[in-house]
Amino acid sequence: MKKYFLLITLVSLCLLLQAQDYNSIKNLAVLQNYQQAKDKFDIAIKEPAFGTKPEAYILKATVYSGLAGSNNIKGTATADDLIKDADAAFIKYRAMDASLGLLSDQVYQMVPINIYSAFYISGYNDYQNKNWQPGFTKLKKAVEYSDLLINKKLLVTSFDTNVLVLAGLVAENAGLKDEAAKYYSRLADASVSGSSFESLYRYLVSYNFTKKNYAAFEKYRVLGKSLFPQSVYFTFDKVDFAVGLVADFNKKMQVLDDLLAEEPNNQKANEVMGELIYDTLNAVSGVQHSNAAQLEQKMVTAFHKSAAQQPGYENPFIYIGDHFINKSVTIKETETKTGTTAAMEQQYLAALDVSRENYEKAAVIFAAKTTLTEKDKVQYKKVTGYLTDIYAIKKIAAKGNAADEAKYAAAEKKWNDVNAAIK
């Protein structure tokens, strides 16, 4: 019984001495005698029992962060080391006391504030000196402490705009695109406004497009347009970005393919794809593509999808008609140089027939319009002119077949009359 009583007495004495150590170090911190408090803490922590309570680590964080901010140390490499140790101690305290109950103590309340301030100021200095990676590491910590301070109502604000902007800027300059987007998204989701913030909305629009997150792309594009109505940037849609972010034809095709994989019936995307392929296949340079046949089929498919999504729109049919007219001309020029063969003549007439089919579809659309613009008239006249020529060629090719000759002659006259009537 006496041994048991003695053990209890010894434990009680240890706890009492431990509490006295905590209080004496804490009192030194209150008096801002941080160096002496650190010296005493560094000795006390060597005792195994001293570090068994969460308070040991918030006490260390208090002393080390306070010393880092003292006039003779602040802004030095030593201060940075002290803040790292304070941060590590506070992380250990949080692991031992998830409730963070000791933050109700006014002395310990200063810990997250001191660490936040140190990381913010040092990160800002790195920003000014363009030390992007070290600056981001510090500002990432500053954001974490800012969030804690707001959550615990130790920071008199509901949103720390400055630290989020700075963290985003430094992350962006460090090439950490995902991290920059994370901080910018928090700002945009809070609808921060003002001319200085337009760039972050632009960043999110471009970033989410490249990530193929089209829902987020549209979200921030619409939000940017509402906050910055004078900016043309937010009027650009997914298709504009698809062809605008890259210069190489193959890369443009890849981006459009990715977009159409998500939205196969996107009218504008199909139209732009068709136009890009048309321009490539019909370039003035006359360079022949090894995969011209595949590109041609892809172009026709894209234009047909575009036309299906926008009935009464003649452009897709005109593009297809123009392409195959150009193709027929190329075949005829080759025939002139090498001599006409039955196979080449068949290809020539087949190309004309594809043109005819699509020009006739365009002509039907023009005929249904109650009013024709000057541009419409030019296009309509071109279409009917080509139809007149195509039927004249078909009439010649049908020589010997009276029925077909008469049919094609009638069609030739029909389109010639329509052409003449366009004023």
Image (tube, rainbow, N blue to C red):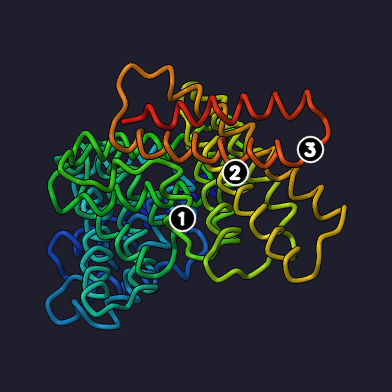
Of labels 2 and 3, earlier in sequence is 2
Q: Secondary structure at mark 3?
A: loop
Instruction: Describe residue 144's horizontal placement relative to residue 383 as left or right.
Output: left
Amino acid on which disc 1 is placed: Asp
**Residue 178 disc label:** 1
Examine the rendered structure and indicate whether residue 384 appears above or below residue 97: above
Image quarter hosting the C terminus: top left
**Residue 4 disc label:** 2
Amino acid on which disc 3 is placed: Lys
**Residue 399 disc label:** 3
List x then y, in percent, for residue 110: 21, 53
**Residue 303 disc label:** none
Distance, label 2 to label 3, CA atoms, is 125 Å
**Closest to the observer: 29 or 177?**
177
Distance, label 1 to label 2, CA atoms, is 61 Å
Q: Quadrant of residue 334?
A: bottom right
Residue depicted at x 31% and y 36%: 189
